[in-house]
Image (cartoon, helix red, strand yellow):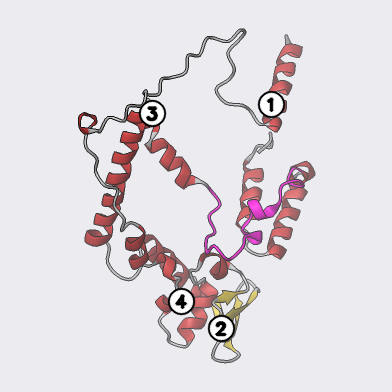
Amino acid sequence: MAGFRGEAFKNALWKCATSTTVNDFSRKMGEMRDIDSSAADWFNDKPPMYWSRSHFTTNSVCDFLLNNCCESFNSSILDARDKVILSMLESLVEYFMTKLQVNRDRAEEKWEGLFCPRIKKLIENNLAKTGDCMPIKADNFHYQVSCYDGSKYSVDLKEWTCGCRKWDLSGIPCNHALSAILSQRLNYLDYVHKYYSLATYKQVYARTVMPLNGRSEWQPTGIIPALPPNFGRPVGRPKRARRMERDEAIETMKKKRKSKAKT
């Protein structure tokens, strides 16, 4: 993180990023400032709505912080990206064709119940934490849930909201909401967003990427095929494969200056 290293900085950053309320985010940023004020100041021009759950909107029903899905996809198509355009597109068609069918087979043959396995596991983890919660009923929909750590949260079963915002952000009932739901002996699965249902998963992968004939069966178009550009070797030292960010470039220059000073 811009030259800030160490386990303390890493833990402080993750606490800020995983905070779900604005007040908790402010407290965690204060803890980071206690470690090193310059580390906290580095985030002054970085709006928390882009990197902390505390400022995420609840419209998307998603609390993801990382782009692991993109990284996984990019790593899966590395071989295709090294090919010429037509060969690359053919490889991508085969990849998507196989991937969609594998997901359909998994949902039809291996998964059971109303929700996907990962969602079931998250719900089970939240259920295990309900022992730390004491729900106080205000009416049929509203509860005040007290926890053993002294925190209190307002739960609204009608609007599917909780003061901790975890339910609001993810669409999966948190331990506070589950304690209120269980106190009324309701089915907690009825309070999980439909986005996570097995039926929705099947609907997402229902479409098929249709197979294609080989090039020998393609109809001629009469258009001259696209040729690769004729790049000559530029003058001077070749550029780096990756352009560094401004903070990263400054840090690299500092290291070079230090090494020159030692010599």
Element at badge 2?
strand
Q: Callout 1, which amino acid? A: Ala
User: Residue tagged by mark 4?
Assistant: 191
- What is the CA distance from the residue labelled 2 to the residue labelled 3? 60 Å
Q: Which residue is mark 3?
A: 85
Depth check, mark 1 against mark 3: the one in front is 3
Q: Which residues are magenta?
A: 42-66
Residue plotted at (54% across, 75% down): 176
Kind of residue indicated by mark 3: Ile
Q: Tell me if residue 32 comes above or below residue 233 in the rendering.
A: below
Check the picture and name the quadrant holding the N terminus: top right
User: Height in image: 208 above or below 222?
Assistant: below
Q: Nearer the viewer, residue 97 or 260?
A: 97
Are the residues tagged 1 and 4 within 8 Å (C-beta)? no
> Label 1: which residue?
249
Calculate the distance from the C-alpha at mark 4 to the C-alpha at mark 3: 47 Å
Residue pointed to by mark 2: 135
In this rendering, the label closer to the viewer, 2 or 4: 4
Q: Give the x, y percent position of residue 64.
A: 53, 55
The three-letter code of the residue at mark 2 reads: Pro
In front: label 4 or label 3: 3
